[in-house]
Amino acid sequence: MNFVAALNEATAKNLSVLEEQIGQAIAEDKFIFEACEPLFKGGKRLRPMLFMLCANSKTDCPLEKTMPLAVALELIHTASLVHDDIIDTSKKRRGVETANSKYGAQIAVLVGDYLFAKAFQLVAENNYGMEVTTILSKLVKNLCVGEIMQDRSLFEVPTLTEYYTRINLKTAIFLSSCCRLGAIVAEMDRREVDNLTAYGTNLGLAFQIIDDLLDFFGDEKVTGKPRGGDLKSGVITLPVIRALEVSDKSQELREIVTTGGDVDNAIKIIQATDAVDYCRTRAEAHIDSARVNLPFTLKTSVALAFEQVADFIVDRTR
């Protein structure tokens, strides 16, 4: 299922403008453009499109008011992926060579830093105000904290609470911030802002759980990433946590995941348990919570789009 197909027609039309302005944002320098341009191919644009959906929740918000911040959100997301790939020494992202593989870690760090800086430049130049800047600053801080937390616990089995703390920092806070920013730009009342923020949080938790499943069981040609990549890097996620609880080969699995052993064997052990159903049930529960938090005051077309986005999150294959 294509993410854009999950949006109502009016919002999907904004995608072409978004793509154009992303290109303009990174066009200042020929090398920077050549280094960054492949990074933006194949992305779902989930974060900026969520933001724009929220910004248009009640009335149509002018593009000149939404687009710079939408672009900034996608730049921040891409910057975080560039830095993630350096940390994980990933060779491919979205089916193409990563910046660190192509140019080396030093250049890739600077490319990521450039994207972060460019995002905040767009926000400053368009006078979004202190509240928006504070939300974005906290977002980037939390992305860093989540990554540090993950990197410091490689090849260690987290508790369920530790796992949720990590995915909240790395993923859920990003989606909730996009929704919150859209509601603020739309000048919605505080209760509506909080409701849409809660929608984004639960959407983000579900998104990451499904992402962790796809790392083991997704089609590499579709996901653009090698199967078991997280486990090879020492990142232990929910399918493993569940399998360790219920598998009769728990000790063998624990040995593999804490020492960087045979990933293919680990996948077989996980598949023999109820880990997939368990993770999907948890993701679907978060989607149900997301839906419950949708305000009743939304335009019908926007409410439908939010429902479709929720369906996309649990049904996606990439």
Image (cartoon, rainbow, N blue to C red):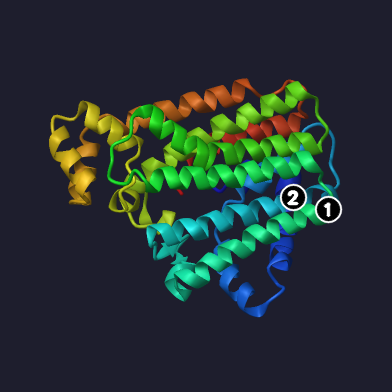
Q: Is residue 199 left or right of residue 232?
A: right
| Image quadrant in which you'd find residue 307 | top right
Which residue is painted at 55% across and 59% down in the image?
42
Observer-side mark, 1 or 2, equals: 1
| Image quadrant in which you'd find residue 104 | bottom left
Compared to residue 26, the image places residue 61 above or below, namely above
Locate residue 52, reporting x and y percent.
73, 43
- Residue wearing tag 2: 69
User: Element under label 2?
Assistant: helix
Separation of marks 1 and 2 at Cα, in angstroms: 8 Å
Q: Is residue 99 left or right of residue 46?
A: left
Find out whether the residues at labels 1 and 2 contact each other: C-beta distance under 8 Å.
yes
**Res 8 visible:** no
**Frontmost residue, 63 versus 252:** 252
Which residue is painted at 76% across and 45% down in the image?
10
User: Element under label 1?
Assistant: loop
Number of residues whose C-alpha sits closer than 10 Å to that of mark 2, classed few (under 14), some (14–19) or many (20 or more)? many
Locate residue 264, reporting x and y percent.
21, 50
Compared to residue 292, the image places residue 73 above or below, namely below
- Residue wearing tag 1: 126
